[in-house]
Amino acid sequence: MIYKVAILQKRAINDEIDKNVQAIIEAMEEASSNGTDILLLPECFMTSYNLPMTYEKSIDDTDIRINKICKLAKEHQIGVVLTSFTKGENAPQNSAFVINKNGEILMKYSKVHTCDFADEKTVEPGKGFKVCDCDGVKLGVMICYDREYPESARILMLKGAEIILVPNDCGSMAPRINALSTRAYENMVGVAMANPNGINAGCSCAYSPICWDREGNCVDNTILLADELSEGLFYAEFDMDSIREYRKNEMMGNTFRKVDAYGALLNRDIKEPFIRDGQECYHQFR
């Protein structure tokens, strides 16, 4: 089974939701004609990742434009990771809806690791990581700054994710794409990331978890690595049969972890040199 992901490398237009929705529709049509299973968008593509964001400008979960994308997903038989600022309980949330080929919203994930050191400190963080079964593949989502923390991908793996999809919008990508390759390796999951194009940006990518062959020889796990400036769709094909066989036999993921030694991971205390302004934002929505 080949699971094909179309990755949109394109910059949304600030404060132009309808134009951004039209760009999504055009990408869906093109990706569907190329036999794609799911379309992955950059972070907050509907609304644009334009900060600071207000509650009033955020999208309601029942917004007619979300319903329109769902109907077109069914019509074109393509899944979509639809991204937007949405209305949380008290403030905007940075969210992704996973929509399957039948146009059903399987899950809504809201970014857990909001960037509380910047304008995103006014955004309400999500409360947990989620996985869903989308057209025969178990998908997890982490959004931009989530991927800076290895725990994000690790939890998604523990919840059963086979592929992790990453809506993104940031620059200085070199260390970040290297980290995504590592997340794929250490968790034995596929990873795909969509980032807007631009100077010091772009570099949308996809990685396989398969890092050595059956003889133990190292192989390059890069499926896709786009350049910075190109705009459009890029395609990544995940060989699920090979990935599943690899996951059954290799020794990363949740195989030999010594979890009794991990208690410090749940300690909320922050000490030097890691104390920063804005860290109280982590708790303000809890």
Image: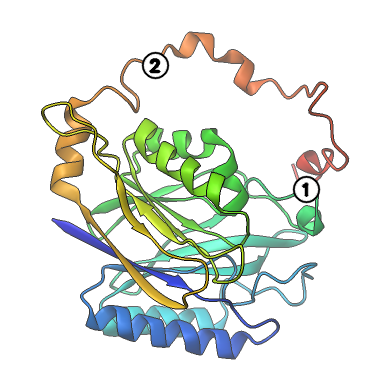
User: In which image quadrant can residue 181 be found?
Assistant: top left
Picture coordinates of residue 52 (x, y %)? 80, 67
| Rendered view: 250 above or below 156 | above
Residue type beneath disc 1: Asp
Q: Residue 61: x percent and y percent?
A: 57, 71
- What amino acid type is highlighted by mark number 2? Arg
Quadrant assignment, res 275: top right
Q: Secondary structure at mark 2?
A: loop
Q: Residue at x 78, y 39 (%)?
A: 283
Q: In the shown orientation, is residue 286 left or right of residue 160?
A: right
Nearer-N-terminus badge (2/1): 1
Q: Is residue 3 above or below residue 130?
A: below
Residue 121 in view of the camera:
yes
The residue that mark 2 highlights is 257
Give the image location of residue 105, x and y in percent: 41, 66
Mark 1 crowd level (few <14, some 14–19, many ≥20, 10 Å Cα) = some
Which residue is at 70% across, 84% downward? 15
For the C terminus, give its image quadrant.
top right
The residue to which callout 1 is attached is 116
Q: Which label was assigned to residue 184? A: none
- Residue placed most toward the observer, 66 or 197: 197
Q: Label 2 to label 1, Cα distance in Å? A: 31 Å
